[in-house]
Amino acid sequence: MSTPLGNPYQAAVPPANATCDTRGCRSVAKVRIIIPRSRLEADGIDHSNDPPIFDACGLHWPRIRDACLRNGHPVVDTTGDLRELAADFTGWSIFYSDGARLYASARVKGSRQSTTLDAYLIGQLRAQLEQAIPTRDAA
Ligand SMILES: [Zn+2]
């Protein structure tokens, strides 16, 4: 997978006990950014002191993601494929709000009630959808 933007970083689910690595923040981490070591030499900058992983809470994740993008590193969600998720849950509209947060909105025919789920990663949203979907609809 090549991208025009540069060397992608990977977004993954952090361990349950992980906390945000942003200075002064100790909130529960929602997203772990993995910086592939093999990529670090490609831009000619010494990254030997960079942490290979960075955990971010929900508050800091959008800012950290923006900073990665500004530095030419798109953040690739490694927890799933968005098109696959949309294909598996056709009753839901799945979309990114601002690129940093995912939403799934139930398409309920003839009902004013709708359910909206949100997550930071595709895998997290999939887990929520699997819980939300009635088992009788399972293929
Ligand atoms: Zn934080």
Image (spheres, grey):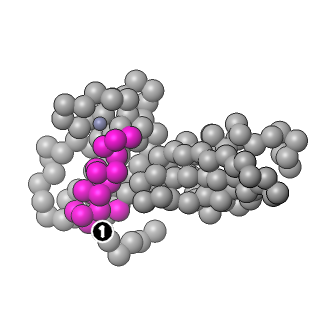
Q: Name above or below for residue 97 compared with residue 126.
A: below
Identity of the residue furthest to the left in this view: 46
Q: Is disc 1 placed on a helix, strand or loop? A: loop
Label 1, residues with CA under 10 Å away: few <14, some 14-19, many ≥20: some
Residue 8 percent location from the top left of the image: 35, 60
Q: Amino acid at mark 1?
A: Gly
Instruction: Answer whether residue 69 is magenta in the image.
Output: yes
The quarter of the displayed image where residue 138 is located: top right
Identity of the residue furthest to the top in this view: 17
Q: Is residue 35 visible?
A: yes
Q: How many marks?
A: 1
- The residue lying at 69 percent from left, 56 percent from top is 92
Residues 47 and 108: in front is: 108
The residue range painted magenta reads 58-74
| Residue beneath disc 1 | 6
Q: Quadrant of ligand 1?
A: top left
Residue 13 percent location from the top left of the image: 46, 39
Q: Is residue 53 visible?
A: no
Q: Name above or below for residue 16 compared with residue 22.
A: above
- The residue lying at 34 percent from left, 46 percent from top is 61
- The residue lying at 42 percent from left, 60 percent from top is 98
Instruction: Answer whether residue 40 is magenta in the image.
Output: no
Identity of the residue furthest to the front in this view: 112
Residue 55 percent location from the top left of the image: 33, 38
Residue 110 percent location from the top left of the image: 82, 57
- The residue lying at 71 percent from left, 61 percent from top is 87
Residues 85 and 25: in front is: 25
